[in-house]
Image: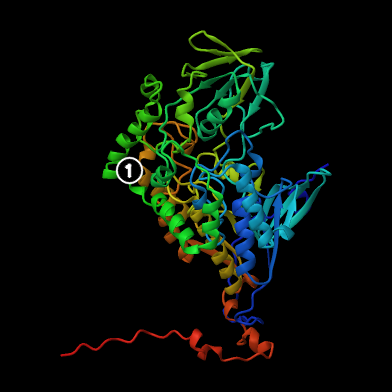
Amino acid sequence: MIRRISEIFGSISYKPTEAPSPDGWIVQERAIDQCRPLRVVVIGSGISGIISSIRLRQRIPNLDLCVYEKNPDVGGTWLENRYPGCACDIPAHTYQASFEPNKEWSTFYAAAPEIQRYWKRVAEKYGCLEHIKFEQQVIEASWNDATSKWNLLVRDLDSLRAYPDECDMLISATGALNDWKWPSIPGLHDFKGKLMHSAKWDESYDYNGQRVAVIGNGSSGIQIVPNMLPTVAHIDHYVRGRTWLAPTFARNQIDMRGAELENFLFSPEEIAIFKADHNAYQKFRKEIELELQSIHGATLLGTPEQIGSESVFAQNMKIRLRRKPELFENLLPSFPPACRRLTPGPGYLEALADDKVDVISSEIVKVDSKGIITADGVHHPTDFLVCATGFDTTFTPRFPVIGRNGVSLAQRWAKTPENYLSVAVDGFPNYFVCLGPNSALGEGSLLLLIEKEIDYFTYCIQKMQRDNIRSMCVQKEAVERFTRHCDQYFTRTVFSSNCRSWYKGGQKDGRVTALWPGSSLHAMKTFAHPRWEDYTYDYVEDNANGWIGDGWTMNEKNKVINVDYLDDDQMDFPPIACVMAE
C-alpha cells in the first residue's frame, strides 16, 4: 500500500523565521564564495527538462541533480504524440536550442519523430541521460518548513512500488499540454468502431480505405485531416468553431521552391551547404527568426499590423479554398486573427476543398455504435472516430503539490491559476514551473522563452548558494500585481476577443491564463534581471548575515592564491574618451 508523504515525513506547519539574537554570534564558518550542496529535482524530460539539466549542471556547483521521467525516453510531447501529421507548427529552424543548431532538418515544419530524435541527441551530447530516471513518476510533493525541503513520493512504473525522496529545489517541467481527455459527448464509448484520441495514437492501426470522423479543428485536427486524406475513403470533419489559418512563415523561402509547396523538403545539397558554410546557415536561420519575432504588433488591438492582418489572412484562405469557395464564408471567424492559436496548417484548407471531405458544423448531440448524430438529425456512419479535442488546460497539477500550511496548489489555483511571471507561486517555496500559467506565446519564439525561464531558475539557485539561503518564496503581493498586470494587458489584445480558446481555458470570455503578457523578446528582458525584492527569504541557521562568511575565500582555504584579476582578459578596461579640439 502506498503511504502518503504526511505519514512518512510528518505534517509541519509554517512558522516565520526568528531573527538571531542581536548579541548572538553571526560570523558563520564558511568562505564567502562557498557553495553549499543543493539537491534539485526536475519533473519531466521534455524540452524544458533537457535544457534544465544542461544549464543547471553547467552553472550550479556542488549540485545533486535528479530528473524524474514517467516515459521510457526523453522528448515529452514529441515522444508521446504520434498522430498522422504531428509536426511543429513553426519552422523547425526556430524550434531548437539556441546553443545547439540543427543544420539537418529534413523539412521546413519538422515531424514529431524527427523533433524527438533531435532532442534525444541533445540530451546525449550534453550528458543528461545519466541524471534521468525513466519510468519513474512523481505522485506527490509536500513542502517541509522544518527542513526547508520538498518531500516527494515517487512511483516506479515497472514494479508499481512507491518510495520517498527529498530535494532542496523542485522544478516542474511537465508541460502544459500533455494531460489529454475525452470530450464530453453522450454515447462516445458506445461506439463499436475504432475510437482514438489524437494524443494517444495507436500507430499499429490501419485506417486505409475507411470512413473517418475527425472531431476538432485545433492544431492537431488541422494536421490530422490532410495527412489522413490520401489513404482513407472519406473524412467527416466536425468543426465546432471557426478559425483563422495563418499564411506560412518565410513565404519567400517557399516561393523559391515552388508556391504550392508549403512544407518543403530540404535537398541533400542544401543541407550540405548549411553544414559546410555556417554563415550561409546563420543567414537563413536569422531570416526566419526575424520574421517570427516581428509580428507582435498584430496581437494588439487597433495597430496597423492588427488591422491589416485580417485582410491578409482572408485573402490567403480564399486562395487555398478556391476549389470550394463556399467554404470560406462558413469558416471565416468574426474575431480577429490570433484570438485562437494560429497555425499555418500546410495542406489543411486544400484538404477541406477535396471531394472526399465533408465539413460538418452542426453540433454533435450523440454517438451511437455505428456513428455520429448531429443536431440537424443526420446520422453519419463512421468506421474510425478520431477525437482531436485537446487537453486539460486548467493548469491543475496532475498530482498533489502541497505548500505551506497544507495548502495544495490545486486549492491555490481553484479559482484561477495566479502566479508570478509564470514561474512561481506564493506559499510554495523553492518551487519553480516551466511553461506554467501565462507562459505560452500567441506569437514569437517559445524556445527562447523556455531558455530564459530556465536561466532565471539558475539565477535563483545561484543566489541561494551565494547568500546562504535555505528557502525563497515569492511574495503574495508580487503575485497579485502580476495577475492584475496580465488582466489589464490582455484587455487591449486580440486574445480577449470573443473566441473560444485554450488560452482562456476553453471559454469565450474567460481570463487569459495561458499567455505571456508580451512578446518573447519582452520575456527575454523580463527574466534577465530577477527582482529579488519580490521574494522573501529564510536563511541557513536563521542567520541573514551568514552570506559574508568567516573572512576567507575558498581558494585561500585551499592554499590556492592567484592574482588573475590583473590579467588583461579579466580586466574591465574603460573606453578612452576622445578629447574634442577647441
Residue 515: give x, y in percent of width and height.
Answer: 45, 45
Q: Residue furthest left?
A: 582
Identify the image quadrant of residue 26. Answer: bottom right
Q: Front-most of 282 and 124?
A: 282
Above or below, comparing residue 367 to residue 105 in the picture: above
Of the 4 image quadrants, the one containing the N terminus is top right
Number of residues whose C-alpha sits closer than 10 Å to that of mark 1, classed few (under 14), some (14–19) or many (20 or more)? some
Residue 170, compared with residue 238, is above or below; it is below
- Residue 88 percent coordinates (x, y): 53, 43
In the picture, measured across the screen, residue 170 lies left or right of residue 240, that is right
Q: Nearer the viewer, residue 28 or 339?
A: 339
Does 414 sit above or below residue 211?
below
Residue 149 seen in this snapshot: no
The residue furthest front is 269
Element carrying mark 1 = loop
Q: Position of residue 360 (x, y in %)?
A: 48, 18
- At horizontal 44% and vertical 31% (from top left) the residue drawn is 500
Count the labels in the image: 1
Q: Which one is nearer the viewer's eye here, 93 or 197?
A: 93
State which quarter of the image contains the C terminus. bottom left
Give the residue pinned by disc 1.
492
Which residue reaches farthest top?
377
Q: Quadrant of residue 246?
A: top left
Q: Is residue 104 visible?
A: yes
Amino acid carrying label 1: it is Arg
Q: How is the image coloured?
A: rainbow
Taking the spot 46% from the left edge, 19% from the top edge, the residue there is: 361
> Which of the 4 image quarters holds residue 395?
top right
User: Which x, y percent locates residue 195?
Assistant: 66, 23
